[in-house]
Image (cartoon, helix red, strand yellow):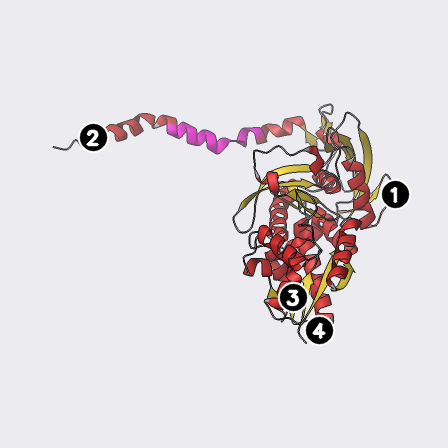
Amino acid sequence: MTRVALAFSGGLDTTVCVPLLEEEYGYDDVIGVTVDVGQPAEEFDEAEATAEALGLEHYVVDAREEFARLCLESVRANATYQGYPLGTALARPVIAKAILEVAEEQDCTGIAHGCTGKGNDQLRFEAVWRDSDLEVIAPVRELGLTREWEKEYAAEKDLPVEGGSGGDWSIDTNLWSRSVEGDDLEDPNYVPPTDIYAWTQDPSDETEEIEITFENGYPVAVDGTEYEPVELIEYLNELAGSYGVGRTDMMEDRMLGLKVRENYEHPGATTLLNAHEALEGLVLTQEERQFKQQIDQQWSQKAYEGLIDAPLVSALEAFIDETQKRVTGTVTIRFEGGQARPVARDSKFAAYSAEHASFDTETVGKIKQEDATGVAKYHGFQRRLANEAIAANADEEVELATDGSGDDE
């Protein structure tokens, strides 16, 4: 008997994939796998109810801890893509790995997803799955299915679906972020209604300050209370979201070259990323900060592509690990006007001296204000020489430009 494991959400795409895998691909048995990376409880209820109605053998895997740890690794890399914190991109390899493990345990010969041929997720899932010997199947992409065709097929087969998420938008939720797209949101000139947001309230005049503690670049506590990764993220999502923190409305460039309109909510992620970057600003040297921007950008790009296990990432993380040894301390964040703004930071590893930097001190140790005179004289010296040479030869350059006009006879 041939078996195929399907990444199963209970929505329209994955529901129609169940009979298609049997009819079009000849599999005797389909099993569904749903992976928990922090979705709302109602999504699991939908998946379980749909699986039961289909008579589908259904597995649910709890991967929240693994995903939360990866999210906090992304904080150490200040990971964003085109300005927003990575969420879906980080979750997909975790989900793909969990589904693959179930597929192998259940002696499957195939593994499938319901992604279209236009998005990023097909690439992220398959990057993990193609390391195995299982047949990788993408019915929606390979059969060229459209949403309208799927709805008609579901009605014809009397499949237990209502056509998707039950609303106008396509929504993907995990611990780290919530994305909203589709329908009118595909128009860049469309102003989204406030009801697309579920994690964030509209910003108000209210403010609040919290203190976040970091150890080796990892956030571990808020206001002195220690939290496990999942609890920390959930707590900050609720708190920061109540102040309207973490909304992004953007035009995003996908891996396939398509430009799409995306809306995101990421209150906890925004708060932690802002705090971490503020602490790095205190403890890292100028050269480290400049070079780490390149490292962070490369880490973020590979994460966006779903290639977090690439050899390059291991090399990048070696540098990140070294810098994070000193990213220990506290950052005070003020929630204000929809922002999570660092307003104070402290660390025993601070590469900073208030005495030396202050305008109110004349001499500290061996450093005096007058010591900067020599530096000031040399600063821009080559520029001055170059400009003097240009000015001295300006007349000659004009003569060369006008000499021998080359009029044709």
Checking the image for residue 366, the label placed there is: none
Which residue does the numbered mark 1 point to in the structure image? 225
Which residue does the numbered mark 4 point to in the structure image? 107
Which residue does the numbered mark 2 point to in the structure image? 405
Residue 59 at what x, y percent from top left?
76, 63
Q: Is residue 292 above or below residue 19?
A: above
**x 67%, y 55%: residue:** 92
Residue 158 at what x, y percent from top left?
68, 58
Please rate how many residues cluster around mark 3, counting C-alpha atoms within 10 Å: few if below 14, some from 14 to 19, many from 20: many
Query: What whole-number distance in Å separates the C-alpha atoms at marks 1 and 3?
Result: 43 Å
Query: What whole-number distance in Å separates the C-alpha atoms at marks 2 and 1?
Result: 80 Å
Residue 389 at what x, y percent from top left?
39, 30
SS category of the residue bearing label 4 = loop
**x 67%, y 49%: residue:** 164
Mark 2 vs mark 1: in front: 1
Q: Nearer the viewer, residue 226 or 41?
A: 41
Query: What whole-number distance in Å separates the C-alpha atoms at marks 4 and 1?
Result: 45 Å
Mark 3 vs mark 2: in front: 3
Q: In this orientation, does residue 211 appear?
A: yes
Amino acid at circle 1: Thr
Which residue does the numbered mark 3 point to in the structure image? 111
Mark 1 vs mark 3: in front: 3
SS category of the residue bearing label 1 = strand
Q: Main secondary structure of the magenta part?
A: helix
Confirm or deny contact between disc 4 and disc 1 (CB under 8 A): no
Query: What whole-number distance in Å separates the C-alpha atoms at marks 4 and 2?
Result: 83 Å
Quadrant for the N terminus in the image? bottom right
Q: Which residues are magenta?
A: 376-390
Q: Is residue 167 above or below residue 122?
A: above
